[in-house]
Structure formats: C-alpha cells, structure tokens
C-alpha cells in the first residue's frame, strides 16, 4: 500500500489559509485567509485584507496602502506607487467633488487618484479620457454602439460589451420598490445595503461592488417603447465610491431628482428619446415624468390576523378571549400535563374566559380564526380588547388617514387631536375606532391659557398602540409617520378614502370658480415633518393621476395648484374637506 505523506501536495484549485492553515477551494488566492478567520480573527486577518486591497489597486497608482500593511508586508514597500495613507488626505486644498471631502496637499492626489493639487489649484488628471463602467451583457440594447450601430440587432444572442459613464444615484434618493412581494418607498442606499448583506453572489471589481439580489426585486421604471411605467425585475445591484458632485434636477412642476454628473438621463429630442449625461442637461430640456403610476400586480390584503402578527413579534403578556371551548376539549389533568402547568390555572382561565396567547397557539388546531375572538393585554380593561381579525375596509382607510394627519401613540395610548371646532371629526374618529378595532375610545378637551384649545380622542390600549407602531408601521409621532406598506398595493377606492381623510385633517385648500359654482382652479397645501410620509403621499396621489410638488424647508410641504388639478380632484372623488 503506498505511503502518502499528509498534506504533501496542494490541489491547483485549493488554497491554504495563512492563519488557521485550513485548506479549501473557497479560500481566495488573493486574500489568502478563509472566511471564518476574517469573521472571528479580524485583527490577524486585517493585514492580509489590506494587502489584497493595496495590490489590487497597485496598477492604477491609487493611494490606498495603510501603515499596518507596511509593517506586516515590508516586501511591498517601494513596489506600489502613490502615497501611503489610511484615510483621504486632510491637510491641503479642499477638493469637494465627492463625499470623501479630501484636502489635497500640493503635488499630491486625492483618495480617488483622479484629482490632484497643482500649485494650489485642484485639477483633474483625466483630460481626454473618461471613467467608465463596463460589463458583458446578452441584451443588444445595452451594446456600446447602440446609438450608431446599424447591425446591433444581429448581435443577439452574443455577449455585447456594455459601457457606461461612472454614474449612480446617491444613497439618500428614494425609490419605489417591490421586495419579496412587499411594496415600499425607501432610500436606495438602504435597499442596496440589505441586499448586499444577504446576497450569495458578490463580485469586487476595483472600486465597484456588484451583487445578485437574493430576493426578487421589482422597481417602477420607464419603458421608452411603450412610454409607460412598468415594474421591471432587478438582475444586479451595484455600489461604488462617489467621485463626483451631486446634481439636483427640478422640473417646472416641482418634481426633483438627485443624480451624479454623468448619470444617463432620458431626454426627448426631435420626437424621439435619447440619453445624455446629467451634466449636459439645460433649461428647457424635456425629460419623462410619471404622471400616473399603475397599481402593482400584487394580491390585495383582505384582513390582518393579529394573533399571527403578534406571534411573529414575540410579544408576551397577551391574552385571547372568547376561546374557552378549547379548555373543555380535554380534562383538566390532561391539559395541565400537556401544557406543563398547575391544574388550578386551567380553572382560572375557564372562569375568566381568557387564556395566554402561547396557550391558545398550542391548543388551536385550526388556522381559521373565529370572528368572535378578541385579544388584549393581560389584566387589561374589557373595553380595550381588539378584534383578532381586522378587516381591510373603507373605515380602516379613513381612520388611517386621520391617524397620519392628527394621531400619535405614547405609552400604550393611541390619541387623535382635533381643533376645538372639529367636533364632528372627533366623533367620527371615535366611532371608527369602535367599528374597526372593537375598542371604546374616550374624548377630552384640552385647555390653553384658560380657554378650550383642542378635542382629544384617545384609547388606552397597549395592543392598539403596538398595532399602529409595529404591525401597520405607521409611525408613533409626526417625525416618524409613514404610509403602511400594504396600502401601496390597494385598489384606488381605498387610497381615495385614506387621502381624503388625511387632507381633511391636515391641509389648507382654496377653490376659485365662476357664478355657476364651476371650479376653475384649486390650491392645496399640507405640511408634515416626516420625509417618508411626504413621499408616500406623493406616490399615492400619482396613483390617482395627480402630480404634487414637494417643497423642502424646515418641514416637507406638499403643494398642488392649477385648473387641470381641480378637474382631477373632482373626478377622483376627493372632497378635501375645505370651505368653498
């Protein structure tokens, strides 16, 4: 029998970790350390990571090597051009081109390697060249010569070189996306960060990181062929270091977008659409703007199962009421043995007709909830118990609109605040809380300087507070308010009810018209401290074909004005709730 020596040879596809001596095909030959050591032994792995970072940018003469890497790898000193530093330079003339905020010393270069200080002036090292991004793509529409190649249709199904200027949207720019079937409006940076953490396929290419999303993502995008907004799937996501200023592009009706200087913008020229870098846009150019966004093809939510939702949240001290028949399916001793509890607790639950949520989930053998079930906090008041099943109804839409405009939660209390002359709205809200949730709300009048100031409608229910904050995720105060995600996929009628009550509670409007009460023009404005709520309301209005303008100052103001708008508001059924 041959006598093989242990670890006598290494497979061409295998690499050995320099820290733990582990051998695997999954160990990068560039990093030279395994994933486990990077995660668990970061201090030891850091010099190897920095060395790989340095050597990968060596050919571009970019200043990236750190002092720790110099100490750990003295053999690379003198082989890499550029200045060794840990961070962007901070002692010199400010560059101001990107978020690194380099202050470049004379005859030195910035962190990007493109900007340099020549006799006290910041200049670009790129003259007739350009910084571009490229990849191979099977789609002929992404071919580098798509604007002037007459044979581009013959390229399919071959791989074409797609080349674009280095361009991006800033991380704070918000976008509408459908992730795992859940619609939401969120900053693009948050969406990218979440997907990078969970992606199984990440590619590092110089200063650009590509990844394949692990989950299905669809975004609202413009189709130049059909001239319509469509929800298209995302195949790849990308993140790169910013290297240019951010432009704010604003249209005549107040719509705005933030992009980098070289971001390709779709522009209408000579009755056809083309693209040009954002830096070359000029006043008077026409760019496509969504005036009506289609409803996402998602299944509308019919009801909210609070037992299931609170089970996901892991909330304790919740009791289920009107389910005592579950306690009579077996004898007291059998139940006590099954639940591993004393027998006297079974008697207490039977008398009170209540049982803890964990007990209900263990005994319930049917996923179909009974309509008579209610839930509430342990030892809570009877009048503050909620229906276990909340129906998605027009009443819920109206109540959500009032909450977004006048409501907030605090220490187990859900409260709505109306003007002293809005007694009708206060009574309507109190009635809606009873119909939708089964909770009995109370009212009180607050005074200011000895005079009646406002009417408060409140319900002391910790469960109801959790419903608004955690399940609906509508926000607890004016700074955190947002449109619940399920609303974006609801039919137009539901959205109209929500917007109508929101504007009733939080807008100022004026109509102008003729003698026959034909309204020719309308001016509506509402103000919120929440950026998320402002953009959520903007999206819902766009679903109705109404394009608002967002004015950003200390707060966010939605402003609608014009004669065409008056017609749209009338046909959409929005009453706005103002004096005409």
Image: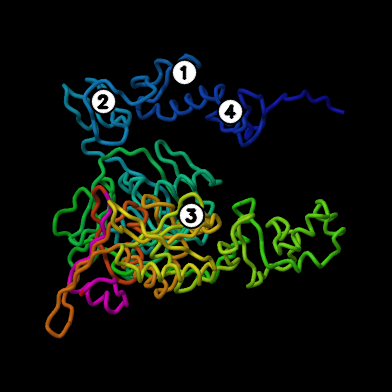
The magenta segment is 555-579
Q: Which mark is residue 329?
A: none
Nearest the eye: 570 or 544: 570
Disc 3, SS: strand
Q: Is residue 456 magenta?
A: no
* Quarter of the image that includes the N terminus: top right
Q: Residues within 10 Å of mark 2 (few under 14, many from 20)?
A: many
Whole-angstrom CA distance, mark 3 to mark 2, is 51 Å
Q: Residues within 10 Å of mark 1 (few under 14, many from 20)?
A: some
Disc 4, SS: loop
Report the residue marked by disc 2. Answer: 103
Q: How is the image coloured?
A: rainbow
**Hey, which quadrant is residue 443 in on the image?**
bottom left
Sequence-first disc among 4 and 3 = 4
Check contact, mark 4 vs mark 2: CB within 8 A: no
Sequence-first disc among 1 and 2 = 1
280 shown above or below 524: above
Q: Residues within 10 Å of mark 4 (few under 14, many from 20)?
A: many
Q: Which mark is residue 413?
A: 3
Disc 2, SS: strand
259 shown above or below 424: above
Sequence-first disc among 4 and 1 = 4
429 on left or right of 363: left
Report the residue marked by disc 4. Answer: 33
Residue 510 lies, in percent from the top left, at: 19, 69
Whole-angstrom CA distance, mark 4 to mark 2, is 35 Å
Residue 364 lies, in percent from the top left, at: 73, 64
């Amino acid at each position: 029998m041959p006598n093989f020596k242990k670890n006598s040879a290494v497979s061409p596809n295998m690499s050995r970790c320099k820290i733990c001596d582990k051998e695997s095909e999954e160990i990068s030959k560039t990093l030279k350390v395994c994933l486990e050591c990077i995660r668990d032994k970061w201090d030891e792995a850091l010099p190897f990571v920095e060395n790989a970072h340095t050597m990968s940018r060596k050919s571009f003469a970019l200043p990236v090597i750190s002092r720790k890497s110099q100490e750990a790898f003295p053999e690379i000193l003198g082989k890499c051009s550029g200045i060794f530093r840990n961070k962007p330079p901070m002692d010199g003339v400010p560059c101001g081109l990107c978020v690194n905020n380099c202050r470049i010393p004379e005859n030195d270069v910035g962190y990007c390697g493109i900007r340099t200080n020549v006799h006290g002036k910041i200049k670009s090292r790129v003259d007739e060249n350009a910084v571009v991004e490229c990849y191979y793509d099977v789609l002929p529409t992404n071919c580098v010569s798509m604007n002037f190649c007459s044979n581009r249709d013959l390229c399919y199904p071959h791989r074409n070189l797609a080349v674009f200027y280095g361009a991006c949207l800033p991380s704070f720019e918000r976008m509408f996306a459908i992730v795992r079937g859940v619609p939401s409006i969120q900053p693009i940076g948050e969406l990218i960060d979440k997907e990078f953490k969970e992606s199984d396929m990440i590619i590092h290419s110089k200063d650009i990181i590509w990844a394949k999303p692990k989950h299905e993502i669809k975004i609202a995008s413009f189709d130049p062929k059909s001239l319509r907004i469509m929800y298209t799937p995302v195949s790849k996501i990308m993140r790169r270091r910013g290297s240019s200023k951010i432009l704010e592009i604003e249209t005549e009706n107040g719509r705005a977008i933030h992009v980098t200087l070289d971001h390709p913008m779709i522009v209408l020229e000579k009755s056809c659409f083309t693209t040009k870098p954002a830096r070359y846009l000029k006043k008077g150019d026409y760019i496509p703007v969504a005036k009506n966004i289609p409803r996402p093809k998602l299944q509308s939510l019919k009801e909210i199962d609070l037992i299931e939702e609170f089970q996901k949240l892991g909330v304790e001290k919740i009791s289920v009421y009107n389910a005592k028949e579950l306690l009579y399916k077996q004898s007291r001793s059998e139940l006590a043995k099954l639940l591993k509890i004393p027998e006297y607790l079974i008697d207490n639950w039977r008398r009170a007709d209540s049982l803890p949520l964990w007990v209900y989930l263990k005994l319930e053998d049917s996923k179909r909830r009974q309509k008579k079930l209610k839930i509430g906090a342990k030892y809570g008041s009877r009048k503050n118990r909620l229906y276990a099943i909340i129906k998605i109804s027009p009443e819920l839409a109206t109540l959500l609109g009032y909450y977004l405009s006048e409501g907030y939660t605090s220490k187990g209390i859900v409260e709505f605040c109306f003007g002293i002359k809005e007694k009708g709205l206060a009574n309507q809200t109190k009635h809606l809380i009873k119909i939708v949730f089964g909770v009995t709300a109370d009212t009180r009048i607050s005074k200011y300087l000895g005079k009646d100031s406002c009417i408060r409608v409140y319900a002391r229910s910790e469960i109801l507070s959790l419903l608004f904050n955690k399940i609906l995720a509508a926000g607890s105060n004016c700074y955190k308010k947002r449109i619940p995600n399920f609303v974006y996929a609801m039919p137009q009628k539901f959205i109209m009810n929500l917007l109508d009550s929101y504007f009733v509670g939080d807008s100022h409007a004026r109509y102008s018209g003729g003698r026959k009460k034909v309204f020719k023009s309308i001016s509506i404005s509402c103000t919120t401290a929440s950026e998320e709520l402002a953009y959520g309301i903007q999206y819902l209005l766009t679903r109705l074909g109404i394009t608002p303008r967002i004015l950003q100052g200390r707060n966010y103001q939605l402003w609608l004005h014009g004669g065409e708008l008056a017609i749209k508001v009338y046909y959409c059924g929005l009453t706005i709730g103002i004096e005409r």
